[in-house]
Image (spheres, grey):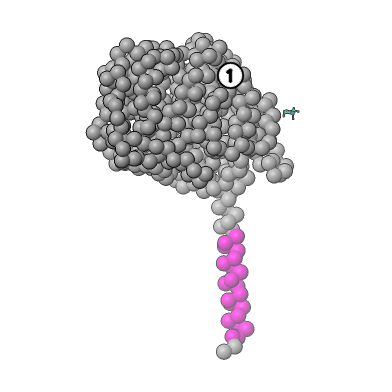
Amino acid sequence: MPMNPAKLSVLFCAAVSILVCVCIYLVTKTKMPVARGWSFDCARCGDYPDELCSALFDGKSVAAVLGAQCEQVHRQRPGLAAGLPVNCSRLLVDYSYITKPLSQEEADFPLAYILVVHKNLETLEWLFRAIYMPQNVYCIHVDQKTPVEFRQAVEGLAACFDNVFLASRAENVVYGGFSRLQADLNCMQDLVSSSVPWKYALNLCGQDYPLKSNRELVQHLKQRWKDKNITPGILQPDHIKQRTTHVHREVISQFESYVVKTSRRKTGSVPHGLKLYFGSAYYAVTREFVNFVLKDERAKDLLQWSRDTYSPDEHYWVTLNRISDAPGADPNAEWEGSIRSIKWLDQAKVAHKGCKGHYVRGICVYGLGDLEWLVQSKGLFANKFEADNHPLVAQCMERWLRRKTLFRSEVPIQQEWHIQNNKCFFDIEGNNCSTTSM
Ligand SMILES: *[C@@H]1O[C@H](CO)[C@@H](O)[C@H](O)[C@H]1NC(C)=O
């Protein structure tokens, strides 16, 4: 049945109007007006103004929706790309590295960091520039099985600083395996011979991020802990006893590595009659304690005994720190110390209101809706972050932490130390964007 011309033109008009509406929608969507009268071009800018972050920290849900749209746009900044040489002077300025101790108190209390990493350069660099201070020392353990380009990029980063080095021995780290513990110990071996007079050692993985500035951390350790170690944990509960009653084995293949529990029971009791504890694999421990870990017979024997146990990093540190004559030991401590803020899946609705990002192995990877919870948490650090998947979370955290860090500086603040606003990082593809810092 043929259509008459009048019907056809009505249809044509309708089609054109729909098209126009879609175009208007798309254009306004990318240039979305934000409260307070400024507009924010999220299609063009990889960096975000403070107002947007503040709204998210205040838990504003509209802002979260807006943020989620802006978050879709993300480009990697140039500077630390695998396979490219690092221009150190440019890296320091572009990424706002702090290049002087910000107070005498911090200069007098250097920290040693152990970073165990295996992937995601961008998240690592984001974490690193947050914890970097020139008076501290950093040992980065790069997994043996990571691609050579990743290792080279980390080496390039480390080469920009006198106080950063890669662990002299690299393990093939298996999740839940002894190798995870050994990686920390390799760094400890290197750190005890460092000329930096560090007071405490702290370990991090590549998906942690600080919730305290260096100054806050130093004061917390000095005032609250006073030469004591932080190793949250309790006597080994029954339901995880099979971790140490049975022989476990690391299985390493080209494609995946994991730990298997064998049916064989472990022979021999815990050396020196030590009582096993269970707790956090994360710690803050004094230099004297690290010396004890590396030299004391009980520590060495417990280490050997732990080789075929499951996730020994969750019993080793806490067990040693409950020995009454270990330096800085805290024999009666339990879970106190809040060394990590983590949203565990099995604690949802009890300890927190759920994860607004997504869960990985029962742990929340933070999304925009978690920012309010994060800045109110009491932990020294939080876990887990994926800066590449949640770039706006990363940028807001960075701004928040840097503001706290510079706020109490006792030295004149250099312009480069401020996280830049409206800085265009899109020149990676040769787009000629102007760089305007505020
Ligand atoms: C590194 O970057 C700085 C500042 O952008 C520039 O002046 C210098 O020429 C660069 N050096 C090299 C070796 O490319």
* Residue 84 x/y as whole percent: 68, 36
Front position in the image: 373 or 15: 373
Residue at (45% x, 36% y) in the render: 174
Task: Tell whether position 90 is magenta.
Answer: no
Q: Is residue 99 above or below residue 1?
A: above
Q: Quadrant of the C terminus?
A: top right
Foreground of the two, 49 or 76: 76
Mark 1 nearby-residue class (10 Å; few <14, some 14–19, many ≥20): some
In the image, 54: left or right of 25? left
Could one spot residue 35 in this view of the protein?
no
Q: Residue at horizontal 36%, vertical 28%?
A: 306
Closer to the camera, 18 or 349?
A: 349
List the residue tagged with mark 1: 163
Looking at the rendering, the stretch of residues picked out in magenta corresponds to: 3-23
x then y, percent, for residue 190: 52, 19
Asked which quadrant contains residue 196, the reply is: top right
Regarding mark 1 in the picture, which secondary structure is present there? loop
In the rendered view of the protein, which quadrant contains the N terminus?
bottom right
**Residue type at tag 1:** Asn
Point out residue 354 in the picture as x, y percentages from the top left corner.
Answer: 35, 42
Can I make out residue 168 in this image?
yes
Looking at the image, the residue that sits furthest to the left is: 238
| Quadrant in which ligand 1 is drawn | top right
